[in-house]
Structures are given as C-alpha cells and as structure tokens.
Amino acid sequence: MDVATLAELLRETSEHHDPYEKTHPKHNWWDWYAAYLNAREQGSSEEEASKAAGLYMEGLAHTTSR
C-alpha cells in the first residue's frame, strides 16, 4: 500500500472511530484502529469495519489481560 492510500485509510479510520470514542469507556485507540484497518483490508465496507472493530473491542473488554 502506498503512503497516500494509507494516509487516506487512516483519515477514514479516524472519522469512524470518533463516534465510538465518544460513546464508550476509555480505551486504547490503536486496538480499534487495528481492527478497523484489518477489516477494510479484508474487503469490508466502512460500516462493516466499524462494526467489526466494535465487536473486537467488546472481546477485549471481556479479557483479564488488558
């Protein structure tokens, strides 16, 4: 992936993370970003990636190692 494409994907990720961040407890933003970026790279739509990131974060919340 070239730098311009990655920059655009990071901007998109930031926009989709904002609503999550405002409605959920304090968390490591990079966990949400990683799940979102992974989903987008696997072909998910923006909405599907947001949902996948949220589900990933729910899973993290239920572990004791975080």
Image (tube, helix red, strand yellow):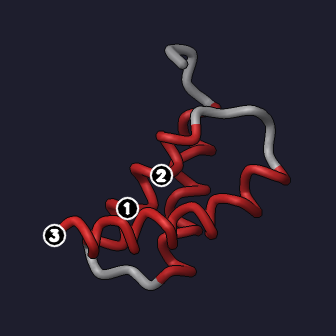
Which disc number belongs to residue 5? none
Examine the image and state in which quarter residue 50 appears. bottom right
Percent x, y of residue 41: 27, 71
Vertically, is 58 above or below 12? above
Cα separation, mark 3 vs mark 2, equals 18 Å
Callout 1 amino acid? Leu
Callout 3 amino acid? Asp
Q: Which residue is mark 3?
A: 2
**Category of crowding for the residue at label 3, using alpha-carbon neighbours closer than 10 angstroms: few (below 14), some (14–19), many (at least 20):** few
Marks 3 and 2: CB-CB under 8 Å? no
Percent x, y of residue 10: 43, 63
Cα separation, mark 1 vs mark 3, equals 15 Å
Which disc number belongs to residue 37? 1
Determine the residue located farthest toward the right in the rendered image.
23
**Category of crowding for the residue at label 1, using alpha-carbon neighbours closer than 10 angstroms: few (below 14), some (14–19), many (at least 20):** many
Determine the residue located farthest toward the left in the rendered image.
1
Marks 1 and 3: CB-CB under 8 Å? no
The residue positioned 57% from the left and 80% from the top of the image is 47
The residue positioned 62% from the left and 68% from the top of the image is 16
Cα separation, mark 1 vs mark 2, equals 6 Å
Please identify, in this view, whether the residue under mark 3 or under mark 2 is nearer the observer.
3
Marks 1 and 2: CB-CB under 8 Å? yes
Q: Which residue is mark 2?
A: 33
